[in-house]
Amino acid sequence: MVAQGLTISPGGARRLLECRVGDIASVSGVEADPSEASLLRAMGLRPGAVIRVCRVGEPSVVEVISGHTCVCHCRCRIGLARPLASRVMVKEVPTGVEVAGAVGAVGAVGAVGAEG
Amino acid sequence: MAFSKRVVLLGNPNTGKTTLFNRLCGLRAKTSNFPGTTQEARVGETRIGGAGGAGGVVVEVIDLPGVYSLELEQSEAAVCREVLAGRLMPRGERAGDPDVACVVLDAANLPRNLVVAGEVLRRRLPTVVALNMIDLARRDGVEIDSGVLSERLGCAVVPVSARSGEGVRSLQDAIASARVTNITPPGSVEGLEAWADGVYAACVRLAPGAVRHAGPGDPSAHAGDVGPVGGRAASPHGLRARTQADTTDRIDRVTMNPALGPVLLAGVMAALFWSIFSLATYPMDWIDWFFGAVVARVHENLPEGILADLLADGVLAGVGATVIFLPQIALLFFLISLLEDTGYLARAAMMMDRLLRPFGLPGHAFVPLLGSHACALPGIMAARAVPDRHDRLATILVAPFVTCSARLPVYVLLTGLLFRGEPLKASVAFVGCYALGLAAALVSAMIARRTILRGSSRPMALELPTYKLPSLRTALATTIDRSWVFLRNAGTNILAICVVLWWLGAYPKVDPPGEVAQMRERAADPALPPDEAASLAADADHAEARHARARSFAGRLGHAIQPVFAPLGFDWQLSVGVLTSFAAREVFVSTMAVVTTGREDAEEEGVMEMVREATREDGSPIFTRRVAWALLVYYVLAMQCLPTLAVTAREAGGARWAFLQLAWMCGVAYLAALGVYHLVA
């Protein structure tokens, strides 16, 4: 099962600002200065973290779904000013990692990137 | 009081740390700042051990600033590091190592929260973990095995709900017997994150059917209750969690909508201001009445002389002038705390970030600027929440431009004078004053960020907490705390300044002029009808007061400084008003009342009118249209509040920032007033 509406191209990294609302992606890095990058990492946006894009633009909002492990209940939502959102790089969620809410319908779970 | 133990509370922001602090310490706590920083902590006391009964001991509890990691460059993290190392304590507290570190974790966001726990454990302090919001985690189908967690961390782990009070007694007992852990979490960021993931995987128990997602780097393939990896239907718990996220999404779609969001924000702000400027007026009137009555009693019961004058007109008038703003300050903090607790304020700050950033201010500056509408003192203190130093300095420097409530009596006097009998135009002018102040703040910030505080504001990253019903207890604790800080800071400053101003205005004592003696003689004539005699005696009193004020030190200063204000059309009487209102702007109307009419009570019916019609010594009106406009603009923009300067110096970390603020605001005000004076002509 593949998440609907995913705009992350297989294997490629793109900016958070280029995602669409509802996309599930994995953080690949933050192109900010070390102090900003450390703060974002400590807030949960660490490499490999799976995020759900809740809002794109000014500001952008992401929900951190997991670090490396997670339960489908997460309450960690981070607002990012546009300049910061443009520095957050995301990529396709690695094969085998399944993510709650990856499909539009409530109650379904998908293994994102299974075809990647 | 010397405590047997000192406990520090620390953890991520939004973990309910402050709610837990309030639960442990009640409403009797104080806020102290850390020397040499703009960070502050709440300090309280709680009883530990004795199974929650009276048999335990009272210990000191310090609520440290929330941090995502102790190793960040932020000042919050630096303060926590120094406190844990025993090198820093809030002002007034004895130095030394904390005896117990109580790490507060959000049970529903454990992987991230455990990183801070690991950083604390590495410091080898007796540690206790409070696993907060355990009720919410349970509701969402997440069971944390606190026994396994305690084993993995090597310290006591107590599931608590700070909101309901569940587990708080157990936590107090655990603090009493806290011990140093025997485990050493990794030191590197990557190692610590992997360790946190491992600890989490070991202790989490999902309700049957709930979903866990294993990533490629998952260090522990914990089976147990966890279902197989692969697509399947979500559990009822998963559904609930998903529904909650959907609800948050739906509310966010309104609160952060580009069109609806600003409208909602404007509505919330309008309601806030309405509360401050309407509801708060009742207690303000009571305070005014109370101080008026006390002053009258002092004059009645004490013999005339320096003691009665000092007590009534210096001390009590000074205290009254401060305390009268307390209802507005308290209400403002109460409402802001409620809004913050709902989760809305974080969204509002994110929305404002877009509007403020072009001026070099971050969204964090929103709350300080909002608070400054009541009074710049709490506004500047609220700037402590602005993380970047340059952003914070810019916020502090420009916050006093925003119209505070002390300017309102002057606005009432002057807009009423400019638009007599035209309330609509007067209202528009009133709103224009607010807009001018805000515009001056934003433009000044922009100039500061291109000159002395070069750079753009730090782009904002803010955790957006889940929407929830606000806690009255937390709001009440914040209100009491902030009100006390306001009274202590402003009360002492304003009191001292008012005593000095009273002295300048009351001394040297001069003999009444001959005409006053003649008026009194005529008033004493038994042939005169009693009404006329009383009126004549009152006129004599006013004339004497006016004469005394003109020859007082303040009057002489007014004469001396008048050439500076002459280009703005101000005469010596207005110059005295401007000069005395450096203590506090609201003093202007009462000073003008004394200078021009001899009456002090500006609230008295007709006195405002008399001030408006006051004349110069040559008989021409003081408040011509040009002068009124120039004065209005001057009062909107000028820095005329010594307590604010004192707080600026303290919060910005040096008197030079206060001098800069004074020079910049007064310079801008003078030039703008000069421009308006000539433009109106």
Image: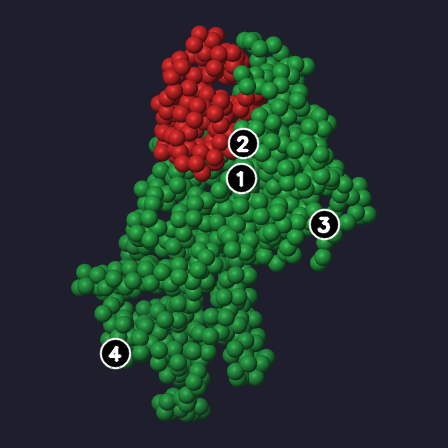
Chain colours: A red, B green
Mark 2: which amino acid? Answer: Val
Instruction: State the quadrant of the C terminus of chain B.
Output: bottom left
Q: From the image, state whether disc 4 or disc 1 is nearer to you.
A: 1
Q: From the image, state whether disc 4 or disc 2 is nearer to you.
A: 2
The residue shown at (55%, 61%) is B488
Disc 4/disc 1 C-alpha distance (Å) = 70 Å
Question: Which chain is disc 2 placed on?
Answer: B
Q: Quadrant of residue A91?
A: top left
Q: Earlier in the sequence, mark 3 or mark 2?
A: 3
Disc 3/disc 1 C-alpha distance (Å) = 26 Å
Q: Earlier in the sequence, mark 3 or mark 4?
A: 3
Disc 3/disc 2 C-alpha distance (Å) = 32 Å
Closest to the observer, B65 or B476: B65
Q: Is residue B620 above or below residue B286?
A: below
Element type where label 4 sits in the image: loop
Q: Which mark is residue B189?
A: 2
Q: Earlier in the sequence, mark 3 or mark 1?
A: 3
